[in-house]
Image (cartoon, coloured by chain):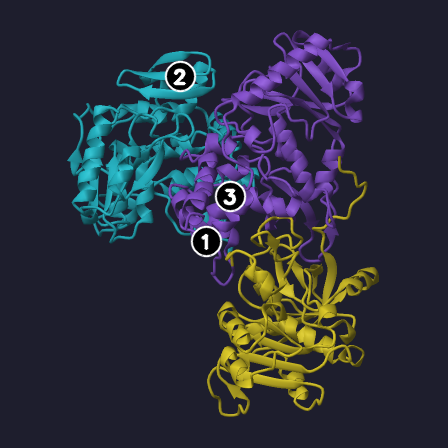
């Protein structure tokens, strides 16, 4: 007989406010919102639990919720960053928010990247399109002096269809000047002022040929990119236990209750969204 | 503790309970039986071999429930508190009671417990009526349960003809049967005989032993396309199922309310993503998901079978699909085709 | 096996063996008592499972829209199913050339729930004969008169004969009286508005939005139903009265000029909700206003799906009378 006298309502969002809002992509399909907490106690609780790779359910009241990967590291400030692709009714409403507007947030949700398992390893971060947002959070986390010493080499490979669609352009420009990491950007077709890689991410990965020795690879991108990048990494010698990805599926509760986002017996919202390829190989083809 | 309740004293007992509880009991609502509030005019419907149509999970997990109220413009939230009255659900069948206990693993355990479910569970007693004459669509004995299974019940009644044998199962129900005579050894023996007879009257629907592993192994096989062929893709099986719990969260704009509604993996839109990609594009994948969830993934999540053999999905499927036959065929495919090769 | 079943199997076998069809859509043996199931036969050896009797309760035309146009479909059709097939062909859901209709004059579909109600018992098996239904229940065997067990739509049936079958198995039956449906609608129309509203709410509010009615209906084949559209959202999902009322009313309207009064929706409904009184009303209005009846042939355009310059304009303010 279950007893729990006054349980928290897990469907109740935390009140948030838009601090900053700006477009990332020249076609305005990608917009970044940086949100601040209305209540101090919520902020403290959030950052106590937060880990890069986690996501939140953002609520636009009257429209619904949308699961979005957190695109900032805790040390960046008292805000939480999300980069949102405009797709449906909720993301459209999120795009229409302005600084000062209120909304709701449930999170942090999901398992996040297993940073403790990656201590001392080389990190090969491979992202494509708007899925790069949580990898950006991961990179920002690793870059902090306190965290940097926990990891060995840092290589970031980030592809977008065109330079206009590239997110976090300004910050990424500064990465080229850093001596604690390697950055490789790619776009699908040549552009006049582009002097980085040209080609699809799986091919760029094969060209760069990162070493699998003492390394983990983290891949986040559209399904087509992931489909070809994972085998490329395997052919470079990365074992399935050392390849990680972040999955997506239609979600509602975000806490493993509504039954919807499962792959086999795993819920993407609760047991994921981060999975190793070894874990995925053990799951049925349900994505 | 075992008591005897003569059948002609039943309504008196329910009336006595009504002084301190809202009593719900199976009664005819139009063409079929439903759990309705017990009152002076109530005509109880306890003799039917089959179950109520609508599952009693709805008494804890309503099909549509407001879980949040908000003000669209200010973002001001209003928490919804559920303050249920004390209730006694009388005449619930063991398959349905076990299903409520199974749903505790979803809503009442772990990190994110559901306050709406918990509030109702805390205020409700489940008094069960065992099935001395299971019907042709019942298969609880094959689904890790039985017509006199006690899981989830505070007390269990066994029909002995002109009286019921009452077995008290929890402290919470102790006071309900005060004043009743104790059951004699002969009456207890009668009850046992009736129970055993009912269990044996149900043919084996499928072999549960080893079934999970077999289903896991046939996941990628074409057998699922065959099994799903005539399926309509409606929600009858999942909505009438006492253990199905999938739900949707929707903002009802006109009412400034976020509502939780039962949902079903059988709809195409259930897994449809905004990009238009659908991981389960045809009925084959969706039927497979339903059977795998109940007969395989539930073991991974809760260490239990996600079905109690109540038979509603068999009875009310508009095209007569029988989950027992589907499970048998999937299992047989593994043994006869996969394994053999 | 009845004579009729034998003939159906023979025809089905011929069509498959001679490569005239890719699939035969018919019924197969029950798994649960009283419930023979729709089935798709592609192999001759599977035809031994083919059955046909009054408990074959589904409108098989529902499955037509699952097959791409190139698939040559053989289908068992009774009166209403043939009309549904015609309506689907008119809506270009399958080409008539790629259809072989095995027609059966229909003596009516038995409602399995009526069988349970009549006996009050758990049913184990049955046998459907022309005059009676033999029902083997747990405690005794019953001989039940068929007519009383028919689904109401069948008791009111006007066209039991398949109107455009390629192969006809059985003697044509007398057509029914159109007054059957008309009277039913008129007696409902004669109620006061309050009575009609109360009846509608009583029925509709049992709805659990399972959409079995929609999925069982041959004419509901939209890839995205209006209830699933969310930008804008037309109806509330869940069981709120507003959403449920809208569901029933709008679905009925979407059936105008398309519904064949087969009753598959009511037979599919797990909550025994009445719906055909709404669609029959719209059907009567189509007849009274446009002299149109759904599915009588596979060529005539339904009034609401076609526009010609000489359409009636009497409803336009100041419009021409025609």
| SS category of the residue bearing label 3 | helix
Q: Quadrant of the C terminus of chain C?
A: top left
> Label 1 near label 2: C-beta < 8 Å?
no
Chain that appears purple: B
Residue B115, horizontal then vertical, whole percent? 74, 43
> Label 3 near label 2: C-beta < 8 Å?
no
Residue A50, horizontal then vertical, whole percent? 75, 65
Q: Which label number is shown at residue C136?
A: 2
| C136 versus B257 height, above or below | above
Res C235 visible: no
- The chain holding disc 3 is B
**What's the distance in space between the residues labelled 3 and 1, CA to CA?**
14 Å
Q: Image point 63% across, 85% down: which residue?
A: A183
Image depth: mark 2 or mark 1 in front: 1
| SS category of the residue bearing label 2 | strand
Which tint is chain C?
A: cyan
| C283 versus A126 height, above or below | above
Which tint is chain A?
A: yellow
Residue C283: quadrant of the picture: top left
| SS category of the residue bearing label 1 | loop
Residue identified by numbered label 1: B220
Q: Image point 45% across, 34% down: which residue?
A: B322
Between residue C38 and residue B194, name the one nearer to us. Answer: B194
Give the crowd class for mark 1: few <14, some 14-19, many >=20 residues within 10 Å.
some
Residue identified by numbered label 3: B291
- The chain holding disc 1 is B
- The chain holding disc 2 is C
């Amino acid at each position: 007989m279950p007893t729990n006298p006054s349980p928290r309502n897990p469907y109740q969002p935390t009140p948030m406010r838009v601090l900053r809002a700006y477009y990332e992509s020249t076609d305005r399909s990608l917009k970044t919102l940086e949100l601040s907490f209305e209540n101090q106690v919520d902020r403290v609780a959030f950052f106590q639990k937060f880990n890069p790779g986690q996501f939140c359910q953002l609520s636009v009241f009257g429209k619904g919720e949308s699961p979005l990967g957190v695109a900032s590291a805790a040390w960046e400030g008292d805000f939480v960053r999300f980069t949102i692709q405009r797709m449906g009714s909720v993301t459209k409403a999120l795009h229409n928010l302005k600084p000062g507007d209120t909304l709701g947030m449930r999170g942090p949700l999901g398992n996040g990247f297993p940073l403790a398992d990656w201590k001392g390893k080389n990190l090969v971060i491979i992202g494509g399109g708007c899925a790069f947002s949580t990898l950006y959070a991961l990179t920002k986390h690793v870059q902090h002096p306190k965290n940097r010493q926990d990891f060995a080499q840092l290589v970031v490979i980030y592809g977008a269809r065109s330079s206009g669609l590239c997110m976090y352009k300004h910050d990424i420009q500064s990465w080229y000047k850093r001596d604690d990491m390697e950055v490789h950007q790619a776009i699908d077709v040549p552009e006049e002022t582009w002097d980085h890689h040209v080609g699809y991410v799986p091919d760029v990965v094969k060209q760069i040929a990162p070493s699998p020795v003492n390394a983990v690879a983290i891949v986040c991108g559209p399904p087509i990119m992931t489909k070809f990048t994972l085998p490329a990494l395997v052919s470079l010698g990365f074992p399935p236990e050392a390849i990680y990805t972040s999955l997506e599926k239609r979600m509602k509760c975000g806490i493993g209750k509504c039954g919807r986002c499962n792959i086999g017996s795993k819920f993407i919202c609760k047991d994921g969204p981060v999975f190793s390829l070894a874990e995925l190989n053990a799951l049925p083809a349900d994505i | 503790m075992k008591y005897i309740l003569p059948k002609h004293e039943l309504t008196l007992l329910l009336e006595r309970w009504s002084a301190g509880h809202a009593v719900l009991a199976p009664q005819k609502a139009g063409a079929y039986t439903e759990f309705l509030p017990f009152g002076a005019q109530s005509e109880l419907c306890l003799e039917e071999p089959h179950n109520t149509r609508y599952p009693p999970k709805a008494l804890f997990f309503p099909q549509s429930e407001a879980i949040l109220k908000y003000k669209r413009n200010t973002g001001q939230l209003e928490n919804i508190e559920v303050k249920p009255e004390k209730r006694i659900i009388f005449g619930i069948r063991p398959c349905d009671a076990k299903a409520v206990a199974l749903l505790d693993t979803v809503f009442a355990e772990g990190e994110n417990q559901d306050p709406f479910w918990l509030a109702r569970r805390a205020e409700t007693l489940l008094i069960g009526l065992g099935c001395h004459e299971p019907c042709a669509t019942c298969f609880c004995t094959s689904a890790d349960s039985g017509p006199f299974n006690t899981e989830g019940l505070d007390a269990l009644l066994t029909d002995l003809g002109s009286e019921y044998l009452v077995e008290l199962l929890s402290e919470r129900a102790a006071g309900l049967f005060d004043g009743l005579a104790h059951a004699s050894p002969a009456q207890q023996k009668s009850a046992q005989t009736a129970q055993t007879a009912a269990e044996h009257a149900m043919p084996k629907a499928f072999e549960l032993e080893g079934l999970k592993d077999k289903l896991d192994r046939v996941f990628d096989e074409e057998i699922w396309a065959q099994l799903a062929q005539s399926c309509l893709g409606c929600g009858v099986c999942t909505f009438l199922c006492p253990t199905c719990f999938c739900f949707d969260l929707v903002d009802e704009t006109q009412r400034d309310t976020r509502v939780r509604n039962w949902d079903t993996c059988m709809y195409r839109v259930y897994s449809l993503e905004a990009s238009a990609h659908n991981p389960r594009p045809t009925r084959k994948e969706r039927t497979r998901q339903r059977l795998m969830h109940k007969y395989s993934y539930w073991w991974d999540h809760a260490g239990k079978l996600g079905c109690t053999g109540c038979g509603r999905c068999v009875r009310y499927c508009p095209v007569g699909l029988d989950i027992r036959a589907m499970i048998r065929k999937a299992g047989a495919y593994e043994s006869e085709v996969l394994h053999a090769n | 096996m009845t004579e009729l079943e034998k003939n159906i199997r023979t025809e089905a076998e011929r069509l498959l063996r001679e490569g005239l069809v890719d699939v035969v859509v018919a019924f197969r043996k029950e798994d649960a008592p009283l419930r023979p199931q729709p089935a798709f036969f592609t192999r001759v050896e599977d035809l031994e499972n083919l059955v046909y009797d009054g408990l074959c309760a589904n409108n098989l035309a529902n499955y037509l829209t699952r097959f791409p146009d190139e698939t040559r479909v053989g289908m068992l059709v009774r009166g209403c199913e043939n009309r549904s097939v015609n309506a689907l062909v008119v809506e270009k859901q399958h080409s008539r050339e790629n259809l072989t209709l095995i027609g059966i004059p229909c003596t009516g579909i038995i409602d399995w729930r009526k069988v349970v109600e009549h006996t009050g018992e758990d049913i184990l098996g049955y046998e459907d004969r022309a005059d009676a239904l033999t029902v083997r229940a747990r405690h005794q065997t019953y001989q039940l008169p068929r007519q009383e067990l028919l689904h109401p739509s069948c008791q009111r049936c006007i066209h039991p004969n398949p109107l455009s079958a390629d192969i006809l198995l059985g003697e044509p039956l007398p057509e029914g009286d159109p007054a059957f449906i008309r009277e039913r609608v008129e007696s409902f129309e004669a109620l006061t508005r309050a009575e009609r509203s109360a009846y509608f709410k009583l029925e509709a509010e049992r709805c659990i939005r399972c959409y079995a009615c929609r999925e069982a209906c041959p004419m509901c084949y939209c890839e995205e139903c209006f209830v699933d559209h969310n930008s804008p959202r037309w109806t509330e999902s869940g069981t709120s009265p507003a959403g449920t009322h809208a569901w029933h009313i709008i679905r009925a309207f979407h059936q105008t000029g398309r519904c064949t009064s087969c009753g598959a929706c009511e037979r599919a409904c797990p909550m025994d909700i009445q719906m055909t009184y709404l669609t029959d009303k719209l059907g009567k209005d189509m007849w009274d206003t446009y002299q149109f009846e759904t599915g009588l042939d596979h060529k005539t355009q339904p009034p609401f799906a076609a526009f010609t310059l000489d359409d009636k304009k009497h409803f336009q303010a100041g419009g021409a009378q025609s």
